[in-house]
Amino acid sequence: MRLNNRQNMKTILLSLVLSFSFVTIQAQTAPANSPVAIHGALKTKGNKVLDEHDKVTSLAGMSFFWSQWSGQFYNTQCVDWLVSDWNCQIVRAAMGVESNEGYLNFPSVEKQKVFTIVDAAIKNGIYVLIDWHEENAIYHQNDAIAFFKEMATKYGSYPNVIYEIYNEPVQYDWSSKLKPYSQALVDEIRKIDPDNLIIIGNRDWDQHPVECANDQVIGTNLAYTLHFYVGTHSQSLRDEATAALNKGIPLFVTEWGVWGSDAELDTWVTFMRDNNLSWCNWAINTKVEPSSALGPNASGTGNWPDADLTSIGYRVRDYIRGWNPKPCTTVRSAYKTMSIPGTIEAEDYDNGCAETVYHETESANKGGKYRTDAVDIEACTDANAGFNVGYIENGEWLEYTLSSVKGGTFDITARVASFDNVVTKSMTIIIDGKLIATIPVSNTGGWQTWQTISIKNINIPSGTNSILRLEFVGGLFNLNNITFTQTSSNQILQFQQGWNLFSTNIQSADNSIATLFNGLDVREVKTMDAFWLNGINPIFNSLQNIEVGKGYLVYMNTAGTLTITGTELTLGFAPLKSGWNLIGSPSSTTKSINQSDYPNATIIKDFDSYWSSNGGGTLQNWNPSNAYFIKSK
Ligand SMILES: [Ca+2]
Ligand SMILES: [Ca+2]
Ligand SMILES: [Ca+2]
Ligand SMILES: [Ca+2]
């Protein structure tokens, strides 16, 4: 039925509104930081594939195997795993067309497998190749057109989708056979989807892209296929690819694998990296053949442990993981609860991102143990075994959140190993931005020959949720752990101008008032029955020393800070006289006041608040730096 003009206009407006909101919804669909959220719609320019920000983009991922023979892998869980564990940025649904089991005989069965993979890719925010996987497609052009028109209608508005219209043509002439097929497919797809990438196959299983470059298909956002098998193809095919690129066409490696010697594996991967070629590796399958990524027992739904991968699959996974590393969004947190004094294992650096909690010169964990960040961790043969950070290089650093740092003087020791005589090396210790110490490191005679390095009498300020940072100068050593042993403690007392109450639990080597208060603007220190006055002849002072656990009054002419350094002593409850007493805190930590602490106490007070055996008052805690007036029955 023909629409009249008014209805027609309404329909156009309505479809504009619908398509606009549709696009908006999809933009929100790609999960944050996913490849599609980052790159958006791909396009071509010259011989490059660009993202929506005009940035040259190459993607790495896996190809599924022929759909008709590996349907057990065509499921959402498998794609989820390839994204979450392998970091695949693209997958390829290789829809088998010919053969008795293929699409031509079972179109809805095979198409449904493609839908499953494409929908899972969209859900995960990755790219997906819809691959017409056959060698003789020129004889099934109408089937291919019908299929891709349906795909373009269903998925053409999703930036995720890439059409691969002819997997691997055999020896058909480009200009007279393959190009007309490709032009027809491109023209039909473009009637529905004006912009998603279309990848075009070429002669001899995609080894002659130069022929395409010399006689190009007309259209936009077209790239041409390059396929290779490491161990079969070598420099001459790389030369062909380079020549095609130099003639200005973009290439897309929709499939490559290993078949035979893997000697040129790195060479081929480097070639793709250098030329920004996107790729999918062949294949997710358990078939016993050289290119399979999975061993015979691997599940059909992902969750593959390393043992389920073939040696090639394991290496390919590494390439994919490192191709476009996932952006780090991990918020810093302690890997384990650690504090000073104590031992900090080098490998227990904080959870978090590179350059936030560590700096590494290269992105692999070269030791391959314990954790999966860039930090190099290996099994350790030192006492208590465990792990050590290895491959330490000049300028690398690690950070650790410490729940508490007890201020005081420390001996610091570290267990190190090195088999290098040449480089001058050391480790610098920084806490909360303050340089604490630098310890030299020298050759121990082997990478697992462990020695203790140490530095003594280092003063460290107290803190909570402190950041310990270890900076490595020179490098070329391994670190097992670092230990902070407290040799003396600090107590820091903040005095206001005027009268203050205080006590201490630190026994310093010289606890005379004259020494402790040297440099402070103090007028007087007193107890209830003795005094010390600044400036008078010392022999007239009835009070000479500060004793641990006792309470004192001090009058400051101006405010000041008293640091008492020495041995921490255990405090306790002093005997009380009847009536008023001045006592020191009975506890070296903040602790609530109970009647049972002093059964005869009726009032406990400082300058600001009181506790009463009858209740009331706001004084609730023994504070280790305070002194108290206490009335006893
Ligand atoms: Ca589109
Ligand atoms: Ca590393
Ligand atoms: Ca390193
Ligand atoms: Ca360790």
Image (cartoon, rainbow, N blue to C red):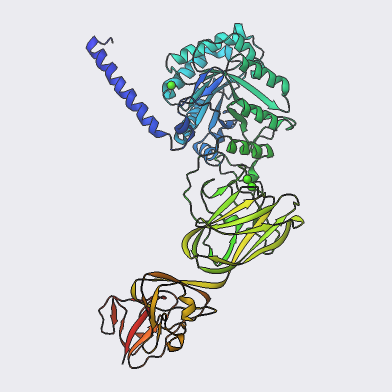
- The reply to whether residue 105 is in sight is no
Q: Measured from the top left, where is residue 29 in percent x and y?
A: 40, 34
Q: What quarter of the picture does the N terminus occupy?
A: top left
Q: Is residue 457 above or below residue 78?
A: below
> Residue at 29% of width from left, 80% of height from top?
611
> Residue at 43% of width from left, 26% of height from top?
158
582 on left or right of 135: left
- The reply to whether residue 62 is in sight is yes
Q: Quadrant of residue 347?
A: bottom right
Nearest to the observer: residue 133 or residue 69: 133
Q: Measured from the top left, where is residue 381 in percent x and y?
A: 71, 59
Nearest to the observer: residue 544 or residue 72: 544
418 on left or right of 621: right
Nearest to the observer: residue 297 or residue 547: 547
Image quarter where ligand 1 lies: top left
Q: Measured from the top left, where is residue 558 in percent x and y?
A: 36, 70
86 on left or right of 228: left
Q: Measured from the top left, where is residue 557 in percent x and y?
A: 36, 73
Q: Residue furthest left?
A: 6
Counting every numbered tag in the picture gives: 0
463 on left or right of 501: right
Q: What quarter of the picture does the C terminus occupy?
A: bottom left
